[in-house]
Amino acid sequence: MTTWLYAELGHDGPLEITEEEILKTYYPWWSNKLREMGREHLISEQNCVEDWVVVHWAWEKGEES
């Protein structure tokens, strides 16, 4: 399972989140919004994680910053 790092205001260093945590917290809201827009064909776990990574400017743990 991939771990992602991201910056958030008010924190001194990067925060960590796993793909499992992203799916648990973001997927329900994200998939519902896509359904509301008629974009069911885009709903997948991979697309959800990719969207979260882009929105949060995250980078994979282990990659150089």
Image (spheres, grey):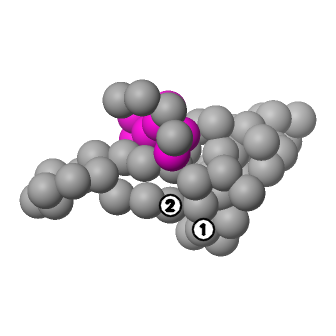
* Quadrant of the image containing the C terminus: top left
Q: Which residue is at a point 59% across and 37% down the rendered structure image?
A: 51
Left or right of residue 6, residue 17 in this image: right
Q: Which mark is residue 21?
A: 1
Give SS at disc 1.
helix
Residue 7: x and y, percent?
28, 47
Whole-number angstrom distance, CA of label 1 to CA of label 2: 6 Å
Whether the residues at callouts 1 and 2 have beta carbons within 8 Å, the answer is yes
Please state the extent of the stretch shown in magenta in the rendering: 54-61
In the picture as drawn, the residue positioned furthest to the right comes out as: 41
Residue 6: x and y, percent?
37, 46
Label 2, residues with CA under 10 Å away: few <14, some 14-19, many ≥20: some
Q: Which residue is at a point 65% across and 70% down the rendered structure image?
A: 24
Residue 32: x and y, percent?
69, 57
Residue annotated with mark 2? 17
Left or right of residue 25, residue 47 in this image: right
Left or right of residue 4, residue 36 in this image: right
Instruction: Examine the image and state in which quarter residue 56 appears.
Output: top left
> Depth check: 60 or 25 in front?
60
Residue 52: x and y, percent?
54, 44
> Depth check: 35 or 63 in front?
63
Above or below for 28 versus 32: below
